[in-house]
Amino acid sequence: MSENSDDERLQELREEKMEELRERQQQGGGDADAQREAQERAEAQQEAVLKQHLTDGARQRLNAVEMSKPEFGEKVKQQVAALAQSGRIQGRIDEDQMRDLLKELQPDQQSFDIRRR
């Protein structure tokens, strides 16, 4: 039941956010404060989804990646949130699954063959 109530709460948050955005657009609210507030709400929603679908170990690994490679970490967070919202994540992602996901999403690295003479 906890997952259902969490899902329902996330849906309520999404609907509230969309309603607020619609109201601001009608009021001509394209100001920076409204955009910043909407961005902060979207980030908070993304964090809630990640907390729901990642184990502590997986979150720690993702945070470590984000500290060293912020753009890549953000890309992975968006991907995990998208997978969760589309219902493609069954259960929770543990640290090993996160490691595999990071390897899949990691841009191709050029390898160097160093040969000693």
Image (cartoon, rainbow, N blue to C red):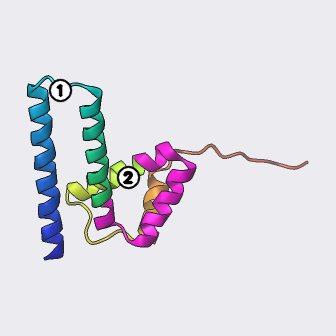
**Residue 32 to residue 85: above or below:** above
Residue type indicated by callout 1 = Gly
Percent x, y of residue 16: 11, 47
Percent x, y of residue 32: 29, 28
- Separation of marks 1 and 2 at Cα, in angstroms: 28 Å
Instruction: Identify the residue at image location x=27%, y=72%.
Output: 91
Residue 47 tag number: none
Q: Is residue 51 magenta?
A: yes
Residue at figure coordinates x 38%, y 71% from the top left: 55
Name the residue at 87% across, 50% down.
Answer: 116
Which residue is at the far right?
A: 117
Q: Residue 77 bears which disc, if any?
A: 2
Would residue 13 appear left or right of 54 to someone viewing this image?
A: left
Residue drawn 13% across the image and 31% down it: 24
Side of 112 relative to 71 (left or right): right
Q: Does the magenta segment cover residue 53? A: yes
Which region of the structure is painted magenta?
50-74
Pinpoint residue 110: horizontal percent, then vertical percent. Answer: 62, 43
Total marks placed: 2
| Amino acid type assigned to the residue bearing label 2 in the image | Lys
Whichever of labels 1 and 2 marks the residue nearer the N terminus, that label is: 1
Query: What secondary structure do most residues of the magenta stretch adopt?
Result: helix
Comparing 22 with 112, the one in front is 22
Give the x, y percent position of residue 9: 14, 61
Above or below — where is 28 with respect to 63?
above
Q: Where the N terminus falls, by quadrant?
A: bottom left
Q: Secondary structure at mark 2?
A: helix
Closer to us: 102 or 52? 52
**Residue carrying label 1:** 29
Q: Residues within 10 Å of mark 1 (few under 14, many from 20)?
A: some
Label 1 element class? loop
